[in-house]
Image (cartoon, coloured by chain):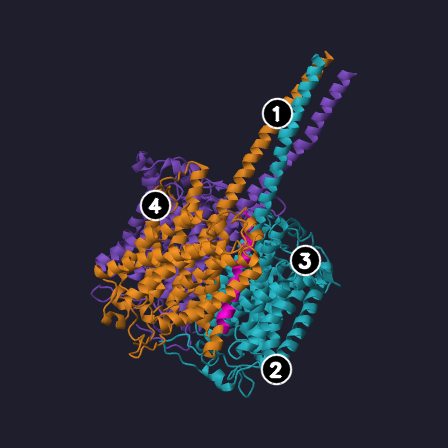
Chain colours: A orange, B purple, C cyan
Amino acid sequence: MLKKLNRYITLLSVSVLLFTLTPLAFAQEAASGSNTIAIDTVWTLMAAFLVFFMQPGFAMVEVGFTRAKNASNILMKNLMDFCIGSIAFWAIGFGIMFGTSVFGLFGKTGFFLSTANPATGEGLWQFAYWMFQVVFAATAATIVSGAMAERTKFPAYLLYSVFICAVIYPVVGHWIWGGGWLGNKGLIDFAGSTVVHSVGGWAALAGAIILGPRLGKYNKDGSSNAITGHNIPLAALGVFILWFGWFGFNPGSTTSGTNLSIATIAVTTNLAAAAGAISAMFTAWLRFGKPDTSMALNGALAGLVAITAGCASVSPLSALIIGVIAGVLVVLSVEFIDKILHVDDPVGAISVHGVCGAWGTLAVGLFAQASYGESSGVGAVNGLFFGGGLSQFMTQLLGVISVFIWVFGAALILFGIIKATAGLRVSKEEELKGLDISEHGMESYSGFQVFTTQ
Amino acid sequence: MLKKLNRYITLLSVSVLLFTLTPLAFAQEAASGSNTIAIDTVWTLMAAFLVFFMQPGFAMVEVGFTRAKNASNILMKNLMDFCIGSIAFWAIGFGIMFGTSVFGLFGKTGFFLSTANPATGEGLWQFAYWMFQVVFAATAATIVSGAMAERTKFPAYLLYSVFICAVIYPVVGHWIWGGGWLGNKGLIDFAGSTVVHSVGGWAALAGAIILGPRLGKYNKDGSSNAITGHNIPLAALGVFILWFGWFGFNPGSTTSGTNLSIATIAVTTNLAAAAGAISAMFTAWLRFGKPDTSMALNGALAGLVAITAGCASVSPLSALIIGVIAGVLVVLSVEFIDKILHVDDPVGAISVHGVCGAWGTLAVGLFAQASYGESSGVGAVNGLFFGGGLSQFMTQLLGVISVFIWVFGAALILFGIIKATAGLRVSKEEELKGLDISEHGMESYSGFQVFTTQ
Amino acid sequence: MLKKLNRYITLLSVSVLLFTLTPLAFAQEAASGSNTIAIDTVWTLMAAFLVFFMQPGFAMVEVGFTRAKNASNILMKNLMDFCIGSIAFWAIGFGIMFGTSVFGLFGKTGFFLSTANPATGEGLWQFAYWMFQVVFAATAATIVSGAMAERTKFPAYLLYSVFICAVIYPVVGHWIWGGGWLGNKGLIDFAGSTVVHSVGGWAALAGAIILGPRLGKYNKDGSSNAITGHNIPLAALGVFILWFGWFGFNPGSTTSGTNLSIATIAVTTNLAAAAGAISAMFTAWLRFGKPDTSMALNGALAGLVAITAGCASVSPLSALIIGVIAGVLVVLSVEFIDKILHVDDPVGAISVHGVCGAWGTLAVGLFAQASYGESSGVGAVNGLFFGGGLSQFMTQLLGVISVFIWVFGAALILFGIIKATAGLRVSKEEELKGLDISEHGMESYSGFQVFTTQ
């Protein structure tokens, strides 16, 4: 009897345990797991919102660094590349970037967000992931408007916006982030020095070449005239907004708030930006005799672009060095593109995003440290300066060259076709009068006396 | 002996389990549960901060779309409606909106945040919830300043600010979100197309009617003159800021970061805004011959306002369609109100917030899909186009009409009383000179030559 | 046999429980614990990003409240104090502030983030903590540029930036937040009314005294001329951005998202700001006859600065009273410093940050309530008005005085040495021409006609 009671009590206790503790623990697992998903979703969305906010950052930089008579036009381009890009990326781009891969070259499924499903956790996550990706696509798209400012036909720019977000950008994205051939080779481009910024920069280069320089930019002897921006406070505001947004761009690229390396990434991002601004300022000071505000602002962007590939793989000190070099590079590149290549890039977009994007991608092959890459999940890779040999650098170089060939080539063809059909450039009269009046029938600063020089 | 030992061991084991595992599991439940509350609080506060940031968004839009001589005045109104609104909503509004219901019409408890208590988790949550709600109240309030710009006496506007945040808005909020009669009927207005935007829009309509048009707005033959804004870059910045803030407004309205439908809501919000901007641009292009920047900017806002009610109930494709229609609607409505009704609304606030808010509320009755509404917690409702019949649409229509009657009526009375007592409109001389000088004794652009036309 | 079976079953069951439930529960503990760390990291980083965004807030306020001919210069100073400050705080400042204490006066370890390690959770947290702290250091630094605007040599400002972020600020930070003597005495300065704002304000006072007033500011009879700002919309935008950033500054200072008092802190912060703006507006209205927009904007900042020390220790009603007093104080202080002390502070930085920072620090000794301080973790302290006697107030007073002596003294010496060596002030010709041209070789508003008065 006692035995039975004993057993009864024991089994009862155990049963109680099994039927209370176990479900409790499983419930806990569920709750804790769903908390993890929630933290990742909250982080990814907040980061996406910050990256979205880079749109007015670009808009203010481009407005500020160009002339008052074209302000509404450039605002409209910045607005529309995001709007058109959002829809093109939803319909086509996201599927090409992240769909089932065709030979590692492009994806072929998931158009119109068709694989996302609001009824499941995985489906809901896909919406969050799309939100994060669409603001990246739009960043690549909007870089181009600055280099093509003050002379591009508005309808031509709308056409361009469709193709960069639907095809040109997503193909690169697939190669590196979407399961494509470059990612499989081990290329590290954590937040997109190449995927986003070089894509924008090389497309800008193609566009600026095909467009030709603004009226009055070059003299008959080949010398270059400075065409100064009309609103430096807005340009500075834009740079600060971009820096702010970059804290979504880089740390957010973990797409996980439970990956604690978001902290290191924020630190490397910040130090590279600071170093870029300082070194660009001193470079300009040495070359031109004065610390030019525009160059310091572009230096901050140069540092940010350059650290974007390696932000999760390098130490704070390396980030600082990468930023310093980017700051020097951007000043020299702006001069080289303007005075040697005679390509007219009103805001320096090719130098900031193309050249410094390439530099940042290569820098991963030099400065990567296994301890940083491991904790962030990028992979325990050492660059050349940390005993890793040349192999990572060569992979990075391959990525830089491949992406240049694809983007520059595709953009040349795209802008060439637009030029031959819809027309790419406004008439001389329209350019002189300003695109606000000629393209949009409005003034940007009604009530102010504005001198529309040249 | 063995039996005893057996029992001893067994009970000991069980005891150990009961005294270690159980508390552990309970501690887990507590930790995991407190994590859930923390995620919800962090999300709700971050969203509230984003919604707060819509204040400078509105300020920049209204400054940019009006004349330079009234810039400081409109900034001051935008600042003060938030400041006064915050205190009025703390003292009175929150209690009317969320207090114990009196016949489903208004609340009667919780004034001065008296039910919130810093010593308990529930009490702390109420502070977070209040923070989220106060920025919504202030959004409704600040919509009106645009429609009444360039001619309203400053003290009159201060008086208005008290009443909209203390009474007019909270009553609607109670009806729909606070346990009142419209919410009980099943009205779906997830983030406030009606509660916030139509309230602002209809109050703006009442204000603009009682004020009358600006000097020089209408000719003797009844034709209308365009009075152009003085700073389109600031207006565009404002729209981008509002779009950014809307990612707090709509996804934040879950007031829960563990509700993963925040991801879908972000997507629908973004697509509707993009579609609204594009369709407003093309509508303006077709009607006026040029793609007007102001109209495209207002189109983005129109899409955002329209998706606000249904953002958690509709698919991305439906969101896009809702946005497209809002973009057409806002252009036609701006023309109709200006040229047919002869109501002078300098920034188009009545069309953007009132008309598109109504459209968005009705659209839920057409486009709602149970799969979206279920996962977001709004409810598994299907609209007319998804097999749900007309009943939801009729409920939405009832809400639109009821809120119009209350808000338009109450605002007419409020502005009527202010006009009859403190005075609502500045003198002709003051209006011509500009409200910056006459009301605030200052210039907004000292050092610049500004032409104060009309 | 049965007994054995009994025991066997029992032990087996228990074993199963011990080997499945226990690890599960421990795994849960780990998962739940890592979620907690993730929430705290996400919150702290997001708050840091918001505080970073205060940089363009300060830049826009200072640009807007000064003259157009000095706009690029002041932007450059705002950019560079953040960039230089970031690197100085990384190399030196953080170690002095949070390193192992030397007699409670300064820290001596942790330079170059040497104690942070990307391979451990604790190490990663240190990166997040540094990110939060560096934006605070830069806030203290950037306050000074406003008071020294329109006449300071650019290289002198760069030198100053190094020292405030490397030494002057971190020493105060160590005293109060880093384990130093004032913190140990029980001083409460939750988010830095004294640590950040008074440090900036008192350094600004020293700088403005040594620099002397701008040309044309004072007449021979000692009367003062108003030198009006050139872009009030940008100044207003700046204030709104600062308010937005303050939601990172104050609630973020928990450096924990699982500390739910972040909600109360957001509420007290918002009410104090609103009250400050309103009371400054009415004070200016009474004294000058019109509700000056600049004063209302400064009133919002005054309220924010004042609530910063006590935001986690006081009730919403107390926050409102603290804000009201700050709003009155800032108007009187601006007049006093301008007209009685004859110190030329173009943007009112000394009054907003120094005076209201001191007021806010003292106010903790008056308004603290144990129920608020306990839940936030600040400590269950009651101020004078809530039965706590004078002791907390005296501690706060000691803090205010000690920090004033250190900062004002150190800054006087610093600016004195700079004046005697590199030179602190531009020439009369440069000042008249504007610092944009003379220091940076550029114009801020190319294409606009700008009158460079005085």
Q: Which residues are magenta?
A: A259-282
Residue C283 location in percent, x, y? 53, 69
Q: Could you classify mark 3 by the number of other residues whose Cα lies within 10 Å: few (under 14), some (14-19), or many (20 or more)?
A: few
Label 3 secondary element: helix
- Cα–Cα gap, marks 3 and 4: 54 Å
Say which residue appears at 51% left-offset and 49% top-offset: A378
From the image, tell me which residue sits under label 1. Answer: A18
Please tell me whether the stretch drawn in magenta is mainly helix, strand or loop: helix
Between B182 and A387, the one nearer to me in the picture: A387
Residue B99 appears in the figure: no
Residue at 66% across / 29% down in the picture?
C18
Please say if the residues under marks 1 and 2 sit with CB atoms less than 8 Å apart.
no
Q: In the rendered picture of this protein, how many numbered marks are placed on residues?
A: 4
Q: Which is more N-terminal, label 3 or label 2?
A: 3
- What residue did someone put label 3 on? C385
Indicate whether residue A265 is drawn in magenta.
yes
Give, as a three-letter code, the residue at label 1: Leu
Q: Nearer the viewer, mark 2 or mark 3?
A: 2
Residue A380: mark in rendering: none
Tell me the quarter of the image containing the N terminus of chain C. Answer: top right
Residue at mark 1 shares a chain with residue at mark 3: no
Identity of the amino acid at label 3? Phe
For marks 4 and 1, give the one nearer the viewer.
1
Q: Quadrant of residue B343?
A: bottom left
Q: Position of residue A361 (x, y in %)?
A: 46, 58
- Image mark 3: chain: C
> Do marks 2 and 3 both belong to one polypeptide chain?
yes
Residue that numbered label 2 is attached to = C421
